[in-house]
Amino acid sequence: MPPQQSAEESNTGQSRACRFCRSRKIKCDRKKPACASCSTHQRSCVYTFEKPKPRLVFILSYLLPSSAIISAIQNEKRAFENILLKLKSSTPDERARVLDQISIVNGGVDFQEAQVSAANINQQNPIAWPETHRPSHPQTALQQHLWKEFQKLRTLMVTTLMSNLMLRGTSPLMIKSLPSRPPREEIQYQLIAYAALEPQEEFSIRLLPDIDGVPVNLAMHLLDLHWNRQHHTFLLTYRPAFMKDLVYGGPCYSKLLLNAIFACASKYSDRVELRDDHANPLTAGGRFFRRCDQLLAENPPWGRSSIPKVVAFLLLGSTFISRIEISKGWSYSGFAMRMAFDLGLHLDCRKPGSTAEDIEIRKRVYWGALVCDKVQSLYLGRPLAMQLRDCHISHDLMDTMEELDVWMPYIDPEYPDTSQALYHATPVHSVSTFEQLCELSKLMAAIINRLYSFSTTPAKAQATLHSLDESLQKWYEQIPEVIAFQPWSEDPIISQKLVPPNIMNLHNTYHSLVILLHRPFISDGNLRSGSVPASSWKKCTVAARNITSIVGAYRSAYTPRGAPYLTSYAVYVSCTIHVRNAALDENQEGENLRLLLASLKMLDELSVPNPGVSRPAAIIRRLMQDNGIPEGSISSPEANVRFPSDTNAIPNSIDLSSLFDTFAPHRQIQATEALSSIDSSLMDSTMNDSLFGFMDNNYHPEALSWN
């Protein structure tokens, strides 16, 4: 029998095993002067004396929430629900007054009953700890310090526990007294409440003297441009998290991302102080591009991956491509897409400690990157970097705060545009539009992989055409009514519907894909067949007319200065159809010519924010020259011009041989006055009007030098 523990040993906390047995995790017989294990291994038998550790049950009695605490959390949650419902149904002025009534008291949210009618809400501190759960009040300075740290730890534990309970609906820790809502709704409530309170944090930014050396007024001008123009297309930057971390510091903010936003938004600004050359708008944002280069030199991109780096590289990559800096833009985009995989954004993984905000951000960044990849593949004619088979995460977004946000064109307070001031606000529908763009990008990937790859054969293409055409039509028919848009409709209620630019971009992309799908079967390529072209050309013509009608509505409502390069691609695609229909007109003075000239004028205007658009505009002028179409003096399209969509625009008796002739290889270019302003490097004998890769004037494998 082991010796009995003496009173002295009990008081001093002697270990029940010697040091050797405890390290080996074996039973110690505690014999003196040495236990059996130490005697066998000829080791010194040493016992240590320690204070007994507090029992886990004792600690958890303070850390785990009691029924009173849970009830307080439920009350605050119901108060959040009530105030969100009130915010949703309020006007902007009423919403501001409601938000002003919210204050923080003793670490809790105080809702004034004058604005929110929530029963049984603790007005002073909704999550107040009951006195019965507190230890005796600390007396010494050390005890007070430890008590404060203990309170912080307990608050953190409760917050983490409640977050896990909300995120894991099937968790065995689920408390029965919690409301039985699906976990999805709980997550949405958290994110929407967070997004609703975020503007209060943004106000504090405007009180700063500068942001990374940029005067705060100029910095906020560029940020406002970003949120108004670029943000709603791809939803790459999660505004609540980015703006919060800009103020307090956090993982969603970095100087590289901030300066990338500044650089990319500068091209939409008319302020001359943003230009290196005040007379040249193409030099806007130069100092921010250089600042990004400096930051990358200090912290190379092959270092640790992060979400701000992914977003910054995607923004910079898209901007460089639109500026005809193809190699730099392609490289930056490549960094972003590989970092996305390095971070596991393509996986539905929730590491310990992940919040609803983390999951939402990862989902938005991954799908935004995937859509950018598909668009750049169209632009540059290069293989897709992100395949759908590698995607294991849905594009079903949880934060729907922006869905019903009102949108108006950005008006620079220093250079106000009076015409934009008359614009009527409209819901932006960012979430549903982005989700539909993600679905459309899947069809875009299928078209690229099946029709625009080297392995495509006429037999494979013919088999694919019908199924892809049906999928596109099904997507179009199932668009939610709130984001439907048909400016060519004979119903004035439908044709005069006002929608924000992101919805117009979505529809332009769809009609561009219709042309991208059908035109290979008509053009002078290996997929052409005598049985398909008449019906395919008719669909191309209708889609081109629809694009021109949408662009006309865009131009009459907004200015092309804020249009993304998605719009440029759609206009160019429509021009490739209009120019051939105009070439087939006998007198070349009909509607096809008007459609062509209106679209070409829009391309010229789009080249201001996106200099790369000068290339497709030059291609169209080359086609006009080769087919004897006079350009004349192109005037601005009429305001509110809406071209009808006639499904019988091209008769079945069209002379297909004449149509095919318009796709013949082009003759050598001869300089003309109309082309004198175009860079000669863009006007070589290899130029054509390819829809896949029309922007990549640098990539010609046969011309590469291997020396």
Image: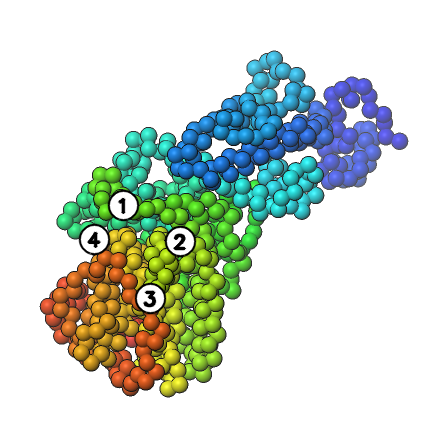
Residue 384 vs residue 474, the one in the foreground: 474
Could you tell me how far apart the alpha carbons at marks 3 and 4 are, in whole angstroms? 31 Å
Residue 94 in percent (x, y) is at 42, 33
- The answer to whether one can see residue 550 in this image is yes
Kindly identify the residue that appears in the image at 63 percent across and 41 percent down: 165
Could you tell me how far apart the alpha carbons at marks 2 and 4 are, in whole angstroms? 24 Å
Residue 45 vs residue 394, the one in the foreground: 394
* Mark 1 and mark 2 residues within 8 Å of each other at the beta carbon: no
Could you tell me how far apart the alpha carbons at marks 1 and 3 are, in whole angstroms? 26 Å
Left/right placement of residue 636 relative to residue 82 reads left
Query: For the image shown, how many numbered marks are present on the structure?
Result: 4
Quarter of the picture containing the C terminus is bottom left
Q: Which residue sits furthest top?
A: 139
Which badge, 1 or 2, is on the more N-terminal residue?
Answer: 2
Foreground tag (3 vs 4): 3
What amino acid does circle 2 point to?
Phe
The local crowd at label 2, few if under 14, some if 14 to 19, many if 20 or more residues have their Cα within 10 Å, is many
* Mark 2 and mark 3 residues within 8 Å of each other at the beta carbon: no
Q: Which mark is residue 422?
A: 1
Kindly identify the residue that appears in the image at 70 percent across and 43 percent down: 172
Left/right placement of residue 534 relative to residue 10 reads left
Residue 505 vs residue 552, the one in the foreground: 552
Residue 581 in percent (x, y) is at 26, 76
Can you identify the residue that label 3 sits on?
546
Left/right placement of residue 349 relative to residue 179 reads left
Which badge, 2 or 3, is on the more N-terminal residue?
Answer: 2
Quarter of the picture containing the N terminus is top right
Foreground tag (4 vs 1): 1
Which badge, 1 or 3, is on the more N-terminal residue?
Answer: 1
Residue 204 in percent (x, y) is at 37, 31
What amino acid does circle 4 point to?
Leu
Can you identify the residue that label 2 sits on?
234
